Amino acid sequence: MKKYITYAMTLLFATIAVSMAAPDKDAIIANEKAAWQAFKDKKTDDFKKLVSADLVAVYADGIMDMKAELDAMAKTTMTSFSLSDFNVTITDADTAIISYKAKIQSKMGDQDNSGDFYAVSVWQMKNGTWQAILHSDMKQAKAATK
């Protein structure tokens, strides 16, 4: 009987340890939303807390680093955004991939960049904090008309 109790307790502690080590998908989604909000509000300090200084961002017009992303933030007027259809994939205890749809109302100078986008980010645990290390999005193609 002692043997079964020992096995049960070991299994219980192992389950607790694994669940505590696994990233929280809701936390990843919350961080992604917070990064978008910081960009929209042009809060560079908040953005830098969420996004790695070594960020790589891939867009139709090129590959950006953190400096280029902050320059784009300064030039962009985002009036609204909404994020939906989240899918979070946990690859290991320190890495998560999030994909989703974004509906954006924004302008950069005189250019309207509004539309529906598909987006993906990779988040990594660094020094006890989740940080985005990769982001990419692309405008949803318009449906072909017959």
Image (cartoon, rainbow, N blue to C red):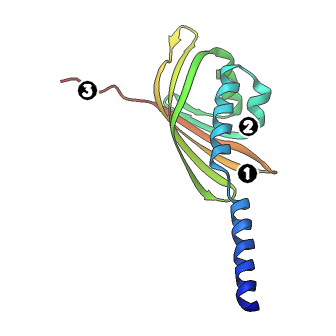
Displayed quadrant of residue 46: top right
Q: Residue at x 73, y 66 (%)?
A: 16
The three-letter code of the residue at mark 2 reads: Leu
The three-letter code of the residue at mark 1 reads: Met
Marked residue nearer the N-terminal end (1 or 3): 1
User: Which mark, residue 50?
Assistant: 2
Q: Is residue 9 above or below residue 112?
A: below
The three-letter code of the residue at mark 3 reads: Ala
Closer to the camera in the image, 25 or 124: 25
Q: Residue at x 80, y 28 (%)?
A: 45
Labelled pair 1, 2 in contact (Cβ < 8 Å): no
List the residue tagged with mark 3: 144
Residue placed farthest to the top in the image? Answer: 110
Report how far apart the C-alphas of labels 3 and 2 lie in the structure: 38 Å
Secondary structure state at the residue bearing disc 3: loop
In the picture, which quadrant includes the C terminus?
Answer: top left
